[in-house]
Image: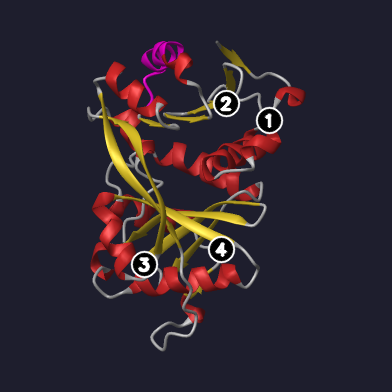
Amino acid sequence: MIKKITSESQFPCALLRQSWRGRKMFSYYKAYGLHYPFCQFYTVGNSGVMLNFNSTVLILQAEPEEVENLAVFLKMHEPFRIECNEPVRNMLAERLPEYQSLHRTTFALQPDMNHPDFHEEDVEFNPSLDKVYEILHAGFPNLEDYSLWLTDTSHRCRHGISHILTYKNSTTASILFDIDNYVLVGQVATLPEARGLGHARLFLRWLAGWLAQFNKQSVLYALDIRESFYREIGFTAIETEYVLERSENSSDIFTKGLLDNGNA
């Protein structure tokens, strides 16, 4: 059974703060609460929790016996991306042929704050969001809805959930959340004319060290297309999983789906 969470007393804060996916869900709760129509939380059976945010669905601790109910829900809402635990993900893949399973690796960031080619004065801690969007759009061409991106990004930054930085006015990375000193980094991109210069490599290694100064454990997600880059710069793979993404190129759902992944 899937049941919408409508009150704070029903919300499983302690459960969500125990895993990376749960913390990601908790960050949306901290940013938006329970009363926005585009950000809805549900219980799934006796132990599962689900978030439906715009075109992404996150599912935590669902039991296999809930797969049929979940499949009906997902067919109705048609999200771009579905992230959930195994074996539920595999069972959903069998029931949702319009989705493909993509392999994703979680990397722990490794610091290097003293590289001679890195200059901290080139880091902008409060960049123009218009400039950030310019960089992201170059790296993620399907990020077409500027107003949607700006509304969500500025809201999360104002509420202290996210923080965006740029380097040399050409590379950007976001702290998507910081929950109990666990930090998820994402939305990494570099302008085309600055690619190949090592900006993303230096910036991410510096960012890892900067976060480590505050005793924060930082990770990022990478699909296989970017996995070799993060291994090459010395980041450590700590776990892998599969996520489901729609195979079709519907612009509305495609816009939101790719931004968790690095694009250096």
Report if residue 72 lies within the magenta region. yes
Q: Tell me whether circle 1 and circle 2 mark residues in contact (CB < 8 Å).
A: yes
Residue range of the region highlighted in magenta in the rendering: 68-79
- Along the polypeptide, which appears first: circle 4 or circle 1? 1
Q: Is residue 229 magenta?
A: no
Q: Residues within 10 Å of mark 4 (few under 14, many from 20)?
A: few
User: Quarter of the image containing the N terminus?
Assistant: top right
**Label 3 neighbourhood size at 10 Å, few (<14), some (14-19), many (20+)?**
many
| Gap between marks 1 and 2 measured at Cα | 8 Å
Q: CA distance from mark 3 to mark 4?
A: 14 Å
Amino acid residing under circle 4: Asn
Residue occupied by mark 2: 49
Q: Secondary structure at mark 4?
A: loop
Residue positioned 38% across, 86% down in the render: 117
Residue under pointer 1: 12
From the viewer's perspective, is the residue at label 1 or at label 3 nearer? Answer: 1
Q: Are marks 4 and 1 in contact (CB under 8 Å)?
A: no
**In the depicted structure, whether residue 212 falls above or below residue 132:** below
Do the residues bearing badges 2 and 3 touch, measured as CB atoms within 8 Å? no
Q: Label 2 crowding class (10 Å Cα cut-off): few <14, some 14-19, many 20+?
A: many
Rendered location of residue 69, percent (x, y): 45, 11
User: In terms of sequence position, does the residue under pointer 2 or pointer 3 come before the other?
Assistant: 2
Q: Kindly identify the amino acid type of the residue bearing the numbered disc 2.
A: Val
Q: Amino acid at mark 1?
A: Pro
| Residue 170 marker | 3
- Residue 44's disc is none
- Horizontal side of 207 relative to 195 (left or right) equals right
